[in-house]
Amino acid sequence: MKRTFASLLLFAGLVEAKAVAAPQSGYHIIKKVSLPGSGGWDYVFVDALGRRVYVSHSTQVEVLDADTFEPVGSIPDTPGVHGITVAPEFGRGFITAGKSDSVVIFDLKSLKPLSEVKVGRKPDAILYDPATKHVYAMNGESDSASVINAADGKLIGTVALGGNNSGYTGTVTQNNNIAMSFTSANAGSAWRGAAVIATSQRKPRMG
């Protein structure tokens, strides 16, 4: 028993010494914010220009002031909410509602829903590309990405990607193509893929 206790003390001492020796990352908690309600949580999106933080929460999106962290409102009726993105030049935001297979479009000032666009099955991650003015919603169970015109909220087309595309990273190439990598969990195995969505300012080419 004494040996075990001494071993534990030694282990604790080693852990403490390692923790002290570890370099400081610079990140630290400055405030904790409690949000009411039940249900799950998913993506957090920060609108740096609009100074707002959007938090997906079960069937709605909680909206906070990015400077004070105080709640400023919520966006209801987004069942199975996942991703959020904004197109500031059009005053619109876009939310993937996984349980209704749709993207909910809302007004950035009032937070009121404007319209709803039906997309593929179980939309998850979503991104806005300022170069093409298009919104890309990743359909987790349709092996595709739905492309929406941010200016009028109309569905432009669908890009077949393959795999269960719940997550993404994306970048814009010099010729306005969208180079996108995505994750998949098809058939119980995880893998990564990549796709290039060929677009232009006038007419996107879906393939």
Image (cartoon, rainbow, N blue to C red):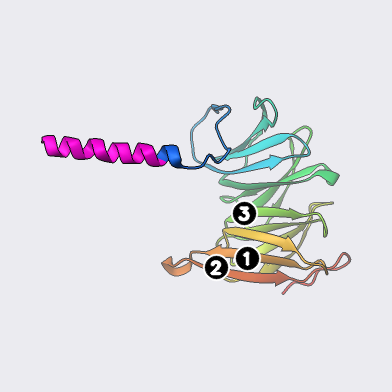
Q: Which residue carries the number 1 mark?
A: 181
Residue type, label 2: Arg
Q: Does residue 85 lie above or below 65 as drawn?
A: below
Q: Nearer the viewer, mark 3 or mark 2?
A: 2
Residue 34 appears anywhere in the view: yes
Q: Quadrant of residue 149?
A: bottom right
**The N terminus - image quarter:** top left
Badge 1: residue crowd in 10 Å (few <14, some 14–19, many ≥20) = some
Q: Please state the horizontal and vertical placement of residue 28, each as a whole percent of the image.
A: 55, 33
Q: Please state the horizontal and vertical placement of residue 178, each as a whole percent of the image.
A: 74, 65
Q: Main secondary structure of the magenta part?
A: helix
Asked if labels 3 and 1 touch by Cβ distance under 8 angstroms, the answer is: no
Residue 119 appears anywhere in the view: no
Q: Which residue carries the number 2 mark?
A: 192
Q: Nearer the viewer, mark 1 or mark 3?
A: 1
CA–CA distance in space, label 3 to label 2: 15 Å
Q: Earlier in the sequence, mark 3 or mark 2?
A: 3
The magenta segment is 1-18
Residue type, label 1: Ser
**The C terminus - image quarter:** bottom right
Asked if labels 2 and 1 touch by Cβ distance under 8 angstroms, the answer is: yes
Q: Which residue carries the number 3 mark?
A: 125
Give the secondary structure at mark 3. Answer: strand
